Image (cartoon, grey):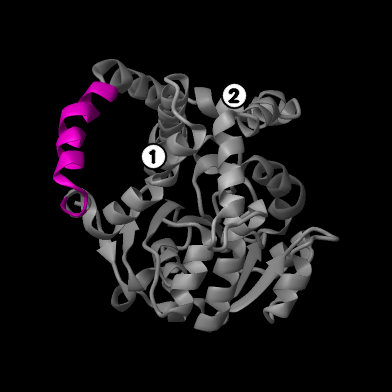
Amino acid sequence: MVNKYYDSDCNFAMLDGKTVAVLGFGSQGHAHAMNLKESGANVVVGLRPGSAHTAKAEAAGLKVMGIEEAAEAGDIVMILMPDELQAQIYREQVEKHMKPGNVLAFAHGFNIHYNQIVPSKDLDVIMIAPKGPGHTVRSQYVEGKGVPSLIAVYQDASGKAKDYALAYASGIGAGRAGILETTFKEETETDLFGEQAVLCGGVCALMEAGFNTLVEAGYKPENAYFECIHEMKLIVDLIFNAGFEGMRYSISDTAEYGDYMTGKRIITDSVKAEMKQVLTEIQDGTFAKNWILENQVGRTMFNAARAAHAGTLAAKTGRELRAKMGWKQAQNLDEAK
């Protein structure tokens, strides 16, 4: 069984007299920094010169420094830049400022697990990975709630690394919802698999395939969009709130019968075999290698795929429908994060 912890199991006083340097102020960065500050931690934010996030961080009452200055000031240095930028930033701007006994922290294990960042042995290396986007981590904290989080210890030079991880997780509100202990390996591989095979790759491909099937059969794109894409949120919200049983209780018996009879015809043994291959490529480093190389050559395939998907009939239909809906829809993609 996984180890679970709550605020009563955490000693937030572990952060007393410490400076937490949060490098980055994007989706996760703003939530970590603001929640920790309001929990009583001494927080500084490290940003590149001219960052668009500087004004936002300062407006929140946070002290903003350059990345190197923040790394030097921090006893606990949390790196919250995108995965593909972290290794270079660490090598060039952070590593030289890390001192024996410092704590190096991450919210995802990618760069440690795949050896893109190799910290010195005199550092504690921990992970605090909230299981939700940064804006939810922030909004739940403000409401007095929290988002569950994973913690992990990669290196324990001080003998107190887990205590630091628990204190940090409590400070961002995770102790209100539950803190689960894992490893860098397990978090990295399961997170990547979930994104690729189910949450992003699998779900998006399934919705678009359903949309295209209806349109190719002569049905209107608008109808196809509502039935195969728009309503996905309604189903997911039911599962989120009450599990599969709650979702099935809330839908019609006709829909539930179709669920049981048809789902297994869509997710066949061949689909499961492909899922296993996706997992193998995550485990053996194939995906990591391809993503690292993709960034080194200017993201040629990534950018082409993004442009192609933005031009599909499903995407165009969705943009047109959302623009006409009576309630507020995010037109700026940054608002949707």
Residue drawn 36% across the image and 62% down it: 148
Q: Extreme top residue here? A: 270
Residue drawn 72% across the image and 59% down it: 97
Q: Amino acid at mark 2?
A: Asn
Which residue has dot 1 on it?
Answer: 227
Residue drawn 72% across the image and 79% down it: 59
User: Residue 94, percent across and down?
Assistant: 71, 54
> For numbered disc 2, what is the local secondary structure?
helix
User: Residue 128, percent across and down?
Assistant: 46, 59
- Magenta part of the protein: which range? 249-267
> For numbered disc 1, what is the local secondary structure?
helix
Residue 185 in view? no
225, above or below 219, in the image? below
Locate the C terminus by quadrant.
bottom right
Which residue has dot 2 on it?
Answer: 290
Decide whether the magenta segment is chiefly helix, strand or loop: helix
- In-front residue for pair 142/240: 240
- In-front residue for pair 233/196: 233
46, above or below 305, in the image? below
Residue 28 in view? yes
User: Residue 289, percent across and down?
Assistant: 58, 25
